[in-house]
Amino acid sequence: SCGSVRISVPSGSEAHDDRYIDLGERTDTMTATIAPPSLSGQPPKQRPSVIETEGRHGEAHRHTDALRGLLRAARPHQWIKNATVLMIPGLGFYTLGVAGLVDALVACSAFCLASSSVYLLNDTLDREADRHHPVKRHRPIASGVVSPTLATVASGAAALTALALGFLVSPMLVAIIAAYLLLTASYSLGLKRLAWVDVAVLAAGFVLRVVAGAVAVGAAVPLLLLTAVFAGAAFVALGKRRSELVLLGDDASSHRSALGTYRLRTIDAGLAATQAVAVVTFGLWVLALEFGPAGAGLALLGAAGFWEVLNAYRRRLMGGGGGDPTRELLANHTLLPGLLVVGLVAFSAGII
């Protein structure tokens, strides 16, 4: 009833009638030591049991796993989305100077922390629903590697640090970061359950990123470019919903209630509409910067490149992929030519 008993005999000792047995008084483990009496009359020190040693090692491993899981739950691979903060500063980086570049990088870092704060909060609130998802059930919080308490504390710390970084740049940037946190927290708490509204909220988050970059360097915010960003982000968000519908089938609504409202036919129509709006407004933005043959040529080239990027992602969706747009961006080489064209056109437009 007391568990295991370990008996150890020090090397070199011989059994004789004067030996004694010292039994630990623990209820979970007992250690028995057989040894000749010491000259001082005091028993030798009791060595830790195997169970105690393994328990300490197991506790250390649990702490290490929790910290690693917390880092995974923060999703640093998703920070690439925050490169949109650098969109406006990047178009005119040659006019910013060192101070302007630093402010832009600080704003981007603040949004990285803010987005991680949102991921931690969202996964904490969604942990029960995520356990019904064939992929998301392996997330650290849903699988139990990271406790909800630890995730909530980390989320709050990341949000406060993001606001502090924004304060180093300007009070307006703090307001934009706070608006992003409130918007995405509202998404996690209920807006994600409303079909089409959830897509609009996700797209608005990218618009706030672009505005934050412009505010950080004191640049103007082109309305046509913001429209293209909103439509492009909505296109990607709709693609995620389509991928979830295909992957989960009849169980889709048990994971995300809004999926019970979506239909593949309406999502495909939304994909076509947002793709068209994104491409046209991007081309018009380039054309608005420079009328004439040069501007028209750049606008057509940029529109064609943007169209091909969105088309490549759409083909992945129709083939059953595209569930993680960030991984698609990093791993799908068919997107790279179009992205390169769009980047060169935008950079050229910035110079103009």
Image (spheres, helix red, strand yellow):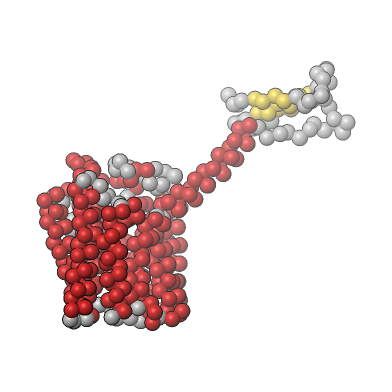
Is residue 149 shown to the viewer in this render?
no
Q: Is residue 76 above or below residue 147?
A: below
x and y percentages locating residue 51 in the rendered image: 61, 32
Q: Which residue is located at x 19 percent, y 41 percent? A: 249
Q: Which residue is located at x 42 percent, y 67 percent? A: 109
Q: Is residue 134 above or below residue 125?
A: above
x and y percentages locating residue 301 in the rendered image: 21, 68
x and y percentages locating residue 74 in the rendered image: 41, 55
Total number of numbered discs in the rendering: 0
Q: Which residue is located at x 13 percent, y 61 percent? A: 273
Q: Is residue 101 above or below residue 328?
A: below
**208 left or right of 239?**
right
In the rendered view of the protein, which quadrant contains the N terminus?
A: top right
Q: Nearer the viewer, residue 61 or 247?
A: 247
In the rendered view of the protein, which quadrant contains the C terminus?
A: bottom left
x and y percentages locating residue 94 in the rendered image: 39, 79
Figure quadrant of residue 3: top right
Q: Which residue is located at x 40 percent, y 63 percent? A: 112
**317 left or right of 340?**
left
**252 left or right of 81?**
left
Is residue 131 shown to the viewer in this render?
yes
Figure quadrant of residue 178: bottom left
